[in-house]
Amino acid sequence: MRIKTLLLIVFGALASCQSPLPLLHFPSGQAPLNEIFSFEVELVDGPAESVSVDADMPAHGHGMITAPVVIKIDETHYRVDGMMLHMPGYWEIYVEVSRNGQSERFMVPLTLEAWQ
Amino acid sequence: MAIVSLALGLVSMMQLSVDLTDDELRAMLSLSPPESPTPRAKPTNKFADNPKAIELGEKLFFREGLAGEGTTQSCASCHNPDLGWADGIQFAKGDGVGTLNTPTVRNSAFSNFVFWDGRADSLWAQAAHPIESPIEMHGSRLGVLHTINDDVELKKLWVELFGELPKYLTSDIGALHAAPNEEFGEIWQGIKASEQLAINTAFVKTLKAIAAFERTVISKHSNFDLFVNGLRKNDIELIEKLSPQAQRGMQLFVGKANCINCHFGPLLSDGQFHNIGLEPYQDILPVVGRPDGIEKVRLDLFNGRNRFSDDTSWKANGQMLYMISNEHTVGALKTPSLRDVALTAPYMHDGRFATLEAVVQFYSLLPGFPGIGHREETLNRLLLSDDELAELVAFLKSLSSL
């Protein structure tokens, strides 16, 4: 599952943006199902003015039931608290990075299984 | 199936009445893990797993007239062990009649939020509500403390565990009932702040003992669990505990019917809140659901972040910090556990369905339009055959504790 998740992250980010993708570091290597968790965002192409994170289940027509909070750790690292992907299925995690008054949105696809 | 079953050492898969895909097999196993789940630690209640608190809590739970002078009910009046720790009737009935079906106490220890809309964030916070509800036990926090003070056995256990009861109970000017609500608010306001604090503190300790007992009310192994154990141990006798009909129902549950989307994990519940799109019922106003629950839990004097909690940190109360309500949570109500579901008829938050057959029929047809909000979009009409409906029900009935 860890390899699958990482592959999805790379594919999704490359598919949606021109800039180098931010790296997402999940504490146990993968996003858990139906539990509050934190993860880190690493900006590989330098500092940004702000980073925000959201997630959605397109097929369900809804997003998360929590509002995550992004905390700056240093110039290129951010911690995201309060994430919860509460249902199994296909999720899209959105990382929005703002630089020089412009924002760029990265989409990271992720599939959670009921049995993970 | 072969690759996964061999990888898991399930050499007895050939004994099954159904041919499961790899995903269906993994899903089925996740519903009955080798180790039975135990409730997570509850740091907001330092007595949660204290044996003396459990003993006291059990006596409090079954004590008739617990809520004080003039009251007659116990917690068990509506949470009857012989009725699946619920009441077997459509609407909760105490001193009055409500418009909601009584949820079971069983497995409630696994919940992050309690009540259909999650308006309490712990079992101890939940227990305060029925005690002071005019349509339930119709008593007061002061009334509960009088009951304990006047009962030799309860008082002994209480004092051994928690220390002295509030002095107000034995003062000449003491009232029999007081609470910060419409009915007893005037009396409550007449009590000195320091005495109010002592009453609230003692009341919360009492609630925590009740919660400690409720944490022990947990489902036992079912025929479905024995069946899964049989697969793991290659024990044909155990495998036969799940009838071919129920096996087909299990396959529907994890596969075509996709019940597992919300009813996953060993409790067969995500513990979350969903709008399943029930039509309006009779002349009852639709329940707002989760948005209302979030507002109430944030304002609750007894939530995990307030002074009566034994751990007010955000670490212990993470879901309180980040939870949100929006248009998608309107009408969303809690997903019940399906463990022992056959024992807790009638079903749904308003008890509108008398049988499990009616429940699965609803999910198969999804009739009408939601009374409020919009239906969870992953719910699609399944149009199950009569045989399939019966198979699903057979599986649900196999989840009863033995």
Image (cartoon, rainbow, N blue to C red):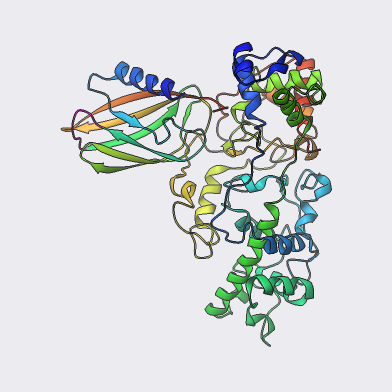
Foreground pick, B259 / B16? B16
Residue span colored magenta: A43-49
How far from the left and from the top, in percent, is residue A23?
Answer: 30, 28
Magenta stretch: dominant secondary structure: loop
Quarter of the image containing the C terminus of chain B?
top right
Number of callouts: 0
Instruction: Say if residue B182 shows up in the picture.
Output: no
Which residue of the protein is positioned furthest toward the left in this rendering? A100
How far from the left and from the top, in percent, is residue B171?
Answer: 67, 86
Q: Is residue B392 found left or right of A66 in the rendered image?
A: right
Q: Is residue A53 found left or right of B78 in the rendered image?
A: left
- At x 67% / y 31%, what residue is drawn? B32
Foreground pick, B261 / A78? A78
**Residue B159 against residue A56 in the figure, above or below:** below
Instruction: Say if residue A40 shows up in the picture.
Output: yes
Quarter of the image containing the N terminus of chain B?
top right
Which residue of the protein is positioned furthest toward the bottom in this rendering? B172
- At x 68% / y 63%, what residue is drawn? B53
How far from the left and from the top, in percent, is residue B378?
Answer: 56, 23
How far from the left and from the top, in percent, is residue A43?
Answer: 24, 31
**Residue B273 against residue B258 in the figure, above or below:** below
- At x 22% / y 29%, what residue is drawn? A44
Residue B76 magenta-highlighted: no
Foreground pick, B306 / B34? B34
